[in-house]
Amino acid sequence: MAMFWRRKRSVNDFQEEIRAHLELEAEALKQEGLSEREARLAAKKAFGNVLGAEERFYEKNRLRWLDEFSQDLRHGLRMMRKAPGFTAAVVATLALGMGANTAIFSLIDAVLLRSLPVQAPEQLVFLAAAGPKGRGPAPPYPCFERFRTQTASYSGMAAFTNTDVGIRFDGPIEQVDAARVSGDYFRLLGIKPAAGRLLTPEDARLDPPVAVISYDFWQRRFGGSPSAIGHTFKWDGVMGGQLFTIVGVTAAEFRGLLPGRTDDLTIPMSLTDEMLKDTGSWWFSAVARLKPGVNPEVARQETDRIFQTFMDEFPVPAEVRRNNFHHLELAPASQGLDQLRRRFSKPLWALMVVVGLVLLIACANITNLLLARSAQRAREFALRVAIGAGRGRLFRQLLTETGLLFAAGAVTGLLVALWAVRGLTSFFAGGARPIQLEVHWDWRVLGFTVGASLLASLLFGAAPMLRALRSDPNGAMKDGGRSTMSRGGGRLGQLLVAFQVALSLILLVGATLFLRTLQNLHRQDMGFNVSRVALVGVHLPHDSYPEAENRTALWDRLLPEVRSLPGVEAAALSSMTPLDGNGRGVAFDAPGFQSESREAHSIGLITASDGYFRTLGIPLLRGRDFTDRDRAGTPYVGLINESARKHFFGDKDPIGTDVVMNKRTVRIIGVVSDVMQEDLRKAPRRFLYISIRQPMDMGARQTLSVKTAGDPELVLPAVLARLRGLGPDVHILRSGTLARQMDEWLIQERLISTLATAFGLLALVLSAVGLYGVLSYSVARKTSEIGVRMALGAMPGQVAWSILRRTMGVIALGLAVGIPVSVLVSHAAESMLFGVTPADGVSQLIAAALLGLVAMAAGYLPARRAGRVDPLTALRHE
């Protein structure tokens, strides 16, 4: 405000100085004998143009551009108010395009671009063994200890692993996501506590042990009360359910090193003594901080030498070392572990391309609207040029008007994006294994929106502005501006619509391919029945059920009770269920089978009860199922799937054959059909099923599968009630249905097919609106021409057909360009398809037919209106 006050005061001073000068000059002339009137006139004549002097002084003040810009803003706002329909159409169209782009970019920022909220994240690296088959976990803990003591490239290292556990305060067991970390974990990351303190190396020797909770868990469980510090709880599975004491709360922004997940609980890794001493156990991740100025490759070579020495001392099979543990890698850790990025990077970038095309279609629509608007205002522009307005000044005004429209669209787009992001984060957060995404509306997201809006306004607002600047004042004044559009504006509008049709076809083809991919994944033979199966995770705490006999007795009690519930057809327990994300492999040796490959001797292992195959609808091909007689104290028995039978036995009958699994002899009693247990896109894996009553480990965590006669959601409450009736020590984990579990596995495919379809339909609507607008404007501009033709004998059908013929030409041009481009674009997404090819003719035909029908419907209304033009009214209007 001070600047404007100073500017106003200096102008006033200058005007006062001129007035004083004129008075002094007039006074001098009066003394020479002139009358007062003659003296004033002579003084003004001698001084010259007062108004011109004031204007020159004002221009030298260098604020003229600000006033002109202010005038342009006010004029632009008036024009927006003057044409509310036009303004609403532009803002709504741009809001949809910008909102979609901002929403997807915010997800990309949260999943792919955002750095961890830790100190100097760019200095962090993960230490991992790697080979031709990919990167794995960190080396065993004894090797990690060597890294910490024998390297000079790092300022610190820490180990960590993630798990989900049941904990108990004073009431029932609660399920939480947890982490076990080495003592330097928080110090290495530079995390500050929100309350209390964090873990330190000294905590490894504390008895009873201590723990740290997350800020979210603190708020959710304790309401943010300071009294949470000092609370104790039991964590089953660590030291037999020993008590832990809460000593601190992590900062609100820190959720752990695994994006999409929050470590609600963190305890010292040192409590798992046996695993820390194991030289052959690969079970945790390691993070390190490079010293400033250290080259990562130099640090990798230094660490790899120690790793190779360790592997020489504690050898693994040569094939395993060559494929999986060939060397040590340093992976950037600034964004945390990359499981989430690996899983969603392709779908998110594909969606970014999709919404980019939607924005192009929206901007092409806006360009057509601006062209029509500039044609309507051609007389106004011509008049302003005729009375002396410079074309540069006119350009600035039009640029300001266009910028205001795009700015309003961008702001509205942010509101659309906020709504869309809430829906998308809810989509990710659903299910038994929620993915927690933190979307921040920071400078990156806002900068993207502002940058995209400015770029769109400059690129797509340029054509209407340049066309307005090229208007001929004489011609525009004579025919009211109607000639401007007729000399090429209509042709440009049609080309833009053809451009929209081509882009819409690309989106519709992509959406069709992704929808058919999802359908193909659902419809293929998976080897099990998805419908009418409820799932409940059950965990028996170690301190309440320390012996295998106790757990088996409870399973023997649970299954008959669940099977007797109304609406239940079958029930079974198993260590895994199809597509649950779990997996376990063991070594398997069959008589007569020989191979030097360790992988050839591997097989997946599932522990299951009797009735498991019937419950999931897995066909028993030969032999028998488990019975209650297959229990501890009797020979181990098992069933294999068809892939395992072919691999290990060929054409031989495996029934009755004794095989060796993890140094235990198991007799094969049956063969079942293959099941897509782990991946719907790959061939079924070899599997061995053993009885739950003959466990080879603790077997404390099982999944109860219940086949129902109707909707499993209606039976679940009764099943849960029966489980709770077994006692407070039975920990009920997440519950749901097998169909929902499959949907969670297909989250990538569902995400991209749902959004691609939604954006494809949006593009279809925008293209139809654009075509309708161009044809309607063309009919309106050519009303007099149509009237003359009809007055000379043209039939209404002929006039309407001429409009439809033009529509068909625009559609044909768009399809001719869109079909080959859609094939090229689809090839980039080939790895995300299943059961269809990028050049799939059915998908192209469906998309082209849908687009053609909608476009013809959009062109029918203007054609019909043209056929109903009254010649007399049209000529009188002219």
Image (cartoon, rainbow, N blue to C red):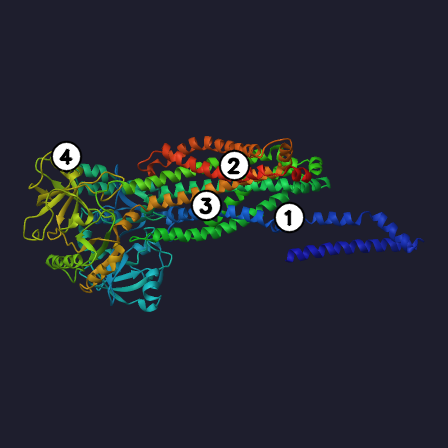
Q: Which-is-in-front pick, marks 3 and 4?
A: 3
Nearest the camera: 167 or 608? Answer: 608
Nearest the camera: 35 or 144? Answer: 35
Name the residue type under label 4: Glu
Q: Quarter-wise, where is residue 9 in the image?
A: bottom right
Which residue lies under the disc numbered 3? Answer: 101
Q: Which callout, 1 or 2, points at the residue further toward the start of the chain?
A: 1
In the rendered image, residue 532, in percent from the top left (x then y), is placed at 24, 51
Label number found at residue 596: 4
Element assignment for label 3:
helix
Residue at horizontal 87 percent and vertical 51 percent from the top? 41
- Quote the CA–CA distance across marks 3 and 4: 53 Å
Name the residue type under label 3: Asn
In the rendered image, residue 479, in percent from the top left (x then y), is placed at 69, 37
Which residue lies under the disc numbered 2? Answer: 497
Q: Which callout, 4 or 2, points at the residue further toward the start of the chain?
A: 2
Name the residue type under label 1: Asp
- Quote the CA–CA distance across marks 3 and 1: 29 Å
**In contact (CB < 8 Å): disc 2 and disc 3:** no
Q: Which callout, 1 or 4, points at the residue further toward the start of the chain?
A: 1
Element assignment for label 2:
helix
Q: Which callout, 3 or 4, points at the residue further toward the start of the chain?
A: 3
Judge from the rendering whether residue 817 lies leftward or rightward of residue 324; answer left or right.
right
